Image (cartoon, grey):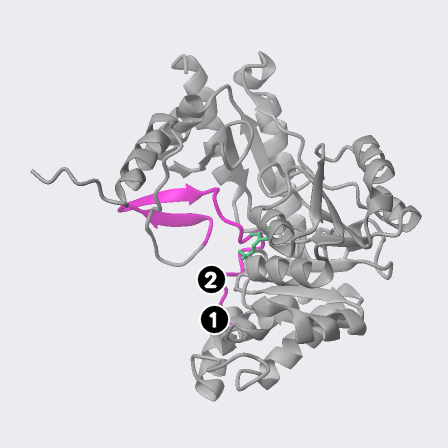
């Protein structure tokens, strides 16, 4: 028997640790078109796991736009944007985003994650300070780490804590960047943007707001939380993704022309990566057109959100305090439970009853929860079915 230890042995024991903590995860294959009902492992399930809030990822108009663009420009961008990968469709999309967001310009990256990594590392460095919400998305946190700036977290949405951190640390650094999700991706609540912008002015800080879950969902025209709060036109950096309500792929930054110009010259994750594919670019552009032409999609979405929240509040498990409905201002509605085993069990029971709603556990979030995300294309009966099954789990003593 070979007893020489392999330098890769640690992977096996690390995986075992993940299993023991009930943190182990693996992807499930989903077949067919995206939508409120999907096929998972041979079964038809009501889908409460999608970020496709407006039901556009399977929309004919987006598919047709992508196909037509492939006919014109082919499948790959063939190079970085500064070399051979810049196509007319990229410029059209950037201009559509800027118009929608009410900014001078916009720049499109190949993913939302890359957008945050590239933008944050371009804006701040070793002599600078980043102060961010403790619940910020992984891409904001890792962008902050990669920048080399001094990083301070404030307690979730806690403006007293933000003020204290600014008072204590701001003067020791050159530039300061405040980072926040607009809608928090694993909780569904909204950042206090107007207060954050006031502090930014008072303490001379830049602000980057991540509208991944706000774009297409919040505000009179669906432009996001910045529009929702009436903060359009104020100095701030709006980033977001085309991968959620826009039903496509890619990320963007919308802001001043100087900002986007600077990013085109300095953001490594834009300069040294291949341009977003023509098909993804065209689908995102078509989505923006549909979102503006069909405000009723947001109305349907918010009706479903109200229906679900009302029904969940009536659940016996919520009334007794065993489960907790986390505060939400969005189509992301979370049911917090005691431990990872419990959410896994509930998620499994839902699955057995034709409902797909994932268990979200540490280390992704501090407390275990069932995360339900709604779509404009869910039917009232889909939500009734979800609530009926949750109600039954109570009778079964779970
Ligand atoms: C999904 C998400 C991202 C990353 O966007 P991708 O386009 O999927 O890479 C960034 N920030 C937040 C808050 C997100 O939820």
Residue behind mark 2: 58
Circle 1 residue: 63
Can you say whether 393 is above or below 348 in the image? above
Query: Going from the N terminus, do you reach mark 1 or mark 2 first?
Result: 2
In the rendered structure, the answer to whether residue 164 lies left or right of residue 63 reads right
| Mark 2: secondary structure | loop
Point 54% across, 59% down: residue: 243
SS class, disc 1: helix
Question: Which of these two is toward me, 225 or 252?
Answer: 252
Q: Is residue 109 something that shows in the picture?
A: no
Residues rendered magenta in the picture: 35-61
Q: Is there a contact, CB below 8 Å, between mark 1 and mark 2?
A: yes
- Residue 89 percent across, percent down from the top left: 59, 81
Residue 186: image tag: none
Residue 287: image location, x then y, percent? 59, 67
Q: Is residue 55 above or below residue 358?
A: below
Q: Residue at x 49, y 69 (%)?
A: 60
Q: Where is 296 relative to 159, above or below? A: below
Q: Is residue 245 above or below residue 361?
A: below
Tell me the residue at 48%/88% (across/down). Answer: 72
Q: Disc 1 versus disc 2: distance between alpha carbons?
A: 7 Å
Residue 27: x %, y % from top left: 35, 46
Q: Is residue 88 magenta?
A: no
> Quadrant where the C terminus lies?
top left
The N terminus, quarter of image: top left
**Mark 1 Cα shell of 10 Å, populated few (<14), some (14-19), many (≥20):** some
Residue 52 located within the stretch drawn in magenta: yes
Q: Is residue 135 visible?
A: yes
Mark 1 near ligand 1 (CB under 8 Å)? no
* 10 Å crowding of disc 2: few (<14), some (14-19), many (20+): some
Q: Residue furthest right?
A: 202
Q: Residue at x 58, y 50 (%)?
A: 142
């Amino acid at each position: 028997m070979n007893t020489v230890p392999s330098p890769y042995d640690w992977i096996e024991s690390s995986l075992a640790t993940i299993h023991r903590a009930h943190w182990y995860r693996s992807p499930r294959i989903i077949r067919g078109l995206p939508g409120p009902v999907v096929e998972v492992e041979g079964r038809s399930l009501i889908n409460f796991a999608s970020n496709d809030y407006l039901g556009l990822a399977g929309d004919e108009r987006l598919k047709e736009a992508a196909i037509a663009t492939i006919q014109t420009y082919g499948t790959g961008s063939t190079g970085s944007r500064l070399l051979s990968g810049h196509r007319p469709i990229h410029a059209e999309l950037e201009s559509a985003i800027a118009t929608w967001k009410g900014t001078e310009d916009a720049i499109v990256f190949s993913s939302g994650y890359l957008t945050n990594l590239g933008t944050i590392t371009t804006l701040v460095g070793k002599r600078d300070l980043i102060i961010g919400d403790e619940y910020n998305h992984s891409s904001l946190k890792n962008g902050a780490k990669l920048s080399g700036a001094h990083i301070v977290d404030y307690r979730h949405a806690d403006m007293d804590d933000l003020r204290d951190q600014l008072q204590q640390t701001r003067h020791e650094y050159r530039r300061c960047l405040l980072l926040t999700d607009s809608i928090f991706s694993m909780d569904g609540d909204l950042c206090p943007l107007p207060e954050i912008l006031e502090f930014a002015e008072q303490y001379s800080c830049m602000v980057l707001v991540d509208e991944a879950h706000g774009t297409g969902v919040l505000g009179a025209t669906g432009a996001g939380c910045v529009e929702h709060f009436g903060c359009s036109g104020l100095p701030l950096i709006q980033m977001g993704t085309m991968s959620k309500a826009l039903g496509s792929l890619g990320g963007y930054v919308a802001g001043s022309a100087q900002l986007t110009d600077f990013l085109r010259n300095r953001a490594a994750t834009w300069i040294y990566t291949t341009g977003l594919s023509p098909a993804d670019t065209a689908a995102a552009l078509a989505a923006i057109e549909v979102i503006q032409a069909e405000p009723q999609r947001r109305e349907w979405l918010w009706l479903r959100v109200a229906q679900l929240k009302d029904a969940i509040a009536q659940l016996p498990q919520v009334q007794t305090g065993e489960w907790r409905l986390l505060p939400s201002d969005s189509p992301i509605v979370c049911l917090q439970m005691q431990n990872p085993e419990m959410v896994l069990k509930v998620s499994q029971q839902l699955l057995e009853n034709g409902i797909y709603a994932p268990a979200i556990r540490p280390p992704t979030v501090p407390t275990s929860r069932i995360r339900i995300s709604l779509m404009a294309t869910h039917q009232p009966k889909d939500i009734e079915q979800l609530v009926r099954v949750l109600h039954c789990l109570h009778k079964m003593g779970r």
